[in-house]
Amino acid sequence: MGKDSLDLFGAPKTLRAVPVMVPLPVPKPYSYLVPEGVHVQAGSLVQVPLGPRQVFGVVWKDADEEKLDPAKLKPITAVFDCPPLKDDMREFLEWIALYTLSPPGLVARMALRAPAAFDPEPMVEGLRLTDERPERMTPARGRVIATAENGPAWTRSGLAHAAGVSTSVVDGLAAQGVFEHVFLSPPPVTAPPDPDFAHSALEADQKSAADQLVAAVRAAHFGVTLIDGVTGSGKIDLYV
């Protein structure tokens, strides 16, 4: 799927084309040129030109048997810095397309429904305490300043909540130069693991039911188990 051309020094270079599944009612991927210096792999999320507009797509599995001239193809315009769709996910999308007699492009659109999720998390605007102090000190302002001294930077709402004041108090201090605006790293998508986490302590009846659930799972055969209990009796804890 490549064709040699010459670089500035006369040495041959290879142009590469890859199939890209676009989120449209199409029966198969379209081929696009991989720009020089750009790395993509099967599952990479990319942006490609389609007619007069730009669309999002997934680099599909290679089709080496299809002979194309990459020099005649449109190039990929952007590669998103996010994990590629795994092989089993793409195979699952193909299975859905076959099972429902749907165009693979429309099924792939389910995985591309929120293109903003491909972008890295944006920086969070924060506040950092300066050496300036307000002309008039109030108890609320004093609490904000004292709280801000306990950390290098705060979000506006986080600082107000920790100090027990409204955000207007924080805004007033920022307007007087008591705080400077900074950018903070985005928070993690999920909370870090808690090494002190422990299973819930189960009562005697709960423990008996949980043991039966564990035994049913370890038996590795299909079965139905019904837990009957009033609200708040710990049914979810048993399943967990």
Image (cartoon, helix red, strand yellow):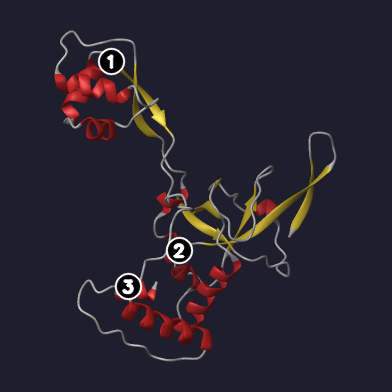
Q: Is residue 107 above or below residue 58?
A: below
10 Å crowding of disc 1: few (<14), some (14-19), many (20+): some
Taking the view exactly as shown, the residue that stands out farthest to the front is 204
Q: Is residue 25 visible?
A: no
The image position of residue 146, as x and y in percent, is 27, 21
Q: CA distance from mark 3 to mark 1?
A: 49 Å
Whether label 2 touches label 1, CB < 8 Å: no
Which is nearer the N-term, disc 3 or disc 1?
1
User: Does 101 sit above or below residue 182?
Assistant: below
The residue type indicated by label 3 comes to Ile
Position in image of residue 229 (x %, y %): 24, 81
Q: Nearer the viewer, mark 2 or mark 3?
A: 3
Per the rendering, the mark at residue 236 is: 3
The alpha-carbon separation of the residues under discs 2 and 3 comes to 30 Å
What residue sits right under mark 2 in the picture? 111
Q: Where 45 falls versus 213 (above or below)?
A: above
Q: Is residue 10 left or right of residue 22?
A: right
Residue bearing the label numbered 1 = 178
Q: Which mark is residue 167?
A: none
Position of residue 92 measured from the top left corner of the image (x, y, whole percent): 52, 74
Quarter occupied by the C terminus: bottom left
Circle 3 SS class: helix
